Image (cartoon, rainbow, N blue to C red):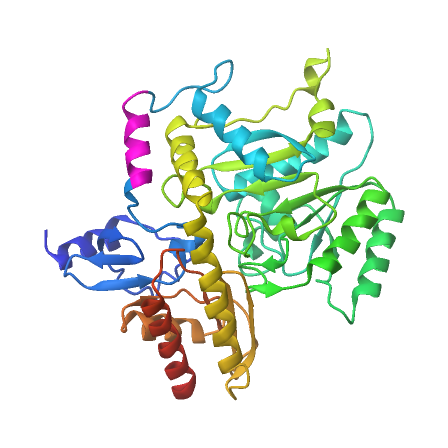
Amino acid sequence: MSTGLWQEKDLHFVWHPFTHLKYAETPINIVRSEGSYYFDEQGNKYIDGISSWWVNLHGHSHPYIAKKVFEQLSTNAHSIFSGFTHPAAIELAERLLNHLPDNLAKVFYSDNGSTSVEVALKMALQYWHNQDKAKTNIIAFENAYHGDTFGSMSVGARNAFNNAFSPLLFGVLRLPVPDNENIDAVKQTLLNHIKAGNVCAFIFEPLVLGAGGSMQMYDAALLDELLAICKQHNVITVADEVMTGFGRTGKFFATDYLGNKPDIICLSKGITGGVMPLGVTACAQFIYDAYISDDKHKTFFHGHSYTANPTACAAALASMDLMEKQETWNNIQQIAAAHTSFKEEIKTHPNIISVRNLGTIIAIEIKTPEESGYLNNLAEKISAYFIQRGILLRPLGNVLYILPPYCISKTDLTYIYTCIENFLTKH
């Protein structure tokens, strides 16, 4: 089928996410991917600079993950997970808990990042409900983004992502993201929220606020101070590591930077190496224990048809095998070092507001006449400029970021940096 016909059919039948429909550009038809590259049907190659929406850790069409997925498809592609289990789910839970903080003890499976957060919120709320305690208030950061289901939208900031649904979302107590100047005020606000009563949980994106905060970064020591207050006042802490997990920040999990460990951690995106959808919500034993009762009403009534899908678990186990190889961590360290060096080169550029990096993430906030934010019109110009040069970057408004697969070559990373410098000069 010709390129034009494929694209005509796409425009006729398909509704793409996060796309302004009236001015939507014709999508590029990708027919093959390998390593750090996409290939369209005309043979054009594109460097994937954002890991296909932050999910692809080890490179596209990775032969080892493909082999393990094929083996699983040939034995047990899917099985119900209520009243049944299977080896891949058991092994994955055990291996994840070996890398997660020691206080976490149980793994609950779902389908994606939003549902992993939804599960965490329901776990925390019902934890108190099962003890006949009316604790329903949730604390979250300003500019947070936690997903697109109703609970995850509620704990996210009110913005373009959820304005249409705002009247239907439950209220949340907000905290400014801490920095060295406001930390005392933020701690006092947190204490005021807690002292007002009925606080169930504090949910946060550790160290990096993704889509909502446009890769806003903050210090682990400051987050530790907030978590210490929560622990002192018996507030459940929930880390949304959907984006930051599996090496993105330079450690296996962003919470590895923290002294105070969360009671619940949400995982998805990179968990399967970008091959299959899968969500995980890991919790501490005391939360699980609140559901052990003769009263059937205290059951956690949550589940998905594809909960712990064996094929997805097999992909995750293969990705874990790769994550546990020193080569992967060497690649992570090389990307982190390259980002740091590039930041030093461009940080004084007159067209930049700020540049920030952590691990394999670097974000550049570009000056524009408009206010910084997701709807900033510079986004379309950035995307078009880099696609024309064979690079996939999907900016958050006027914030251009790189978050590449760990297998990206030094040559490709340098090429992306060069194109960014050229864009900044022409902008």
Q: Residue drawn at (59%, 59%), measured in percent from left and top?
A: 209
Quarter placement of the C terminus: bottom left
Q: Nearer the viewer, residue 328 or 127?
A: 328
| Residue 375 visible in rendering | no
How many dots with numbers?
A: 0
Our reading of the magenta stretch's main secondary structure is helix
Residue span colored magenta: 64-75
Horizontal side of residue 384 vs 107, given as left or right: left
Q: Residue furthest top?
A: 294
**Residue 230 in picture, x, y percent from top left:** 80, 46
327 up-or-down from 115: above or below = below
Residue lying furthest front in this view?
A: 326
Q: Position of residue 139 (x, y in %)?
A: 74, 49
Q: Is residue 147 left or right of residue 411?
A: right
Residue at the spot 68% in from the left edge and 60% down from the top edge: 142
Question: Which percent across, then down, holds residue 180?
Answer: 76, 69
Q: Which residue reaches farthest left?
A: 1
Along the line of sight, the residue nearer the viewer: 329 or 166? 329
Left or right of 236 on screen, residue 82: left
Q: Is residue 304 magenta?
A: no
Please tell me which residue lies in front, 296 or 9.
296
In-front residue for pair 202/166: 202
